[in-house]
Amino acid sequence: NSMTKMQLKAVEAYFVAQNLADANSVVNLFTEDADVYNVNFPKFSGKSGIQAFCENLYDRTSARNFEIISTAQGENDVVMAHWKVAMT
């Protein structure tokens, strides 16, 4: 499966919004039944869960600089990103 341009733009928009601490833009990239996984945390589900994930990140950091290393598409429209970040 290859990632569509729209999916790639969504992944890019996600990290731009995270860098700007723009939780509303992050949340609006997802459907209500979406899940966000981060290996250091439990799964965050739905728009309210993703909002909570963002607020937790912004509460713990003063600045973020995410950089996408690679992207991949899994089954059932699952999109994954390998990224690195510098945070303060």
Image: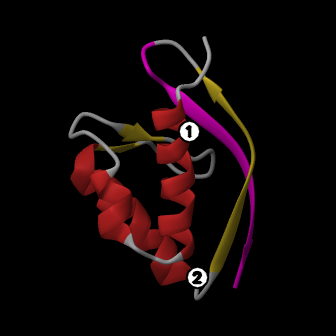
Looking at the picture, does residue 14 appear above or below residue 7? below
Q: Position of residue 48 (x, y in %)?
A: 23, 55
Residue at left offset 36%, top offset 69%: 23
Predominant SS along the magenta part = strand
Task: Count numbered badges in the picture.
Answer: 2
Looking at the picture, does residue 2 appear above or below residue 6? above
Residue at left offset 40%, top offset 73%: 22
Q: Which labelled disc corresponds to residue 61?
A: 2
Q: CA distance from mark 1 to mark 2?
A: 26 Å
Q: Is residue 83 rendered magenta in the image? A: yes
Amino acid found under the numbered disc labelled 2: Thr
Q: Position of residue 11 (x, y in %)?
A: 53, 46
Residue furthest to the front: 5
Considering the image in quadrants, where does the C terminus appear? bottom right
Magenta segment boundaries in residue numbering: 76-88
Residue at left offset 58%, top offset 24%: 3
Q: Residues within 10 Å of mark 2 (few under 14, many from 20)?
A: few
Looking at the picture, does residue 24 appear above or below residue 79? below
**54 displayed left or right of 69:** left
Depth check: give the residue in front, 40 or 4. Answer: 4
User: Label 1, on which residue?
Assistant: 8
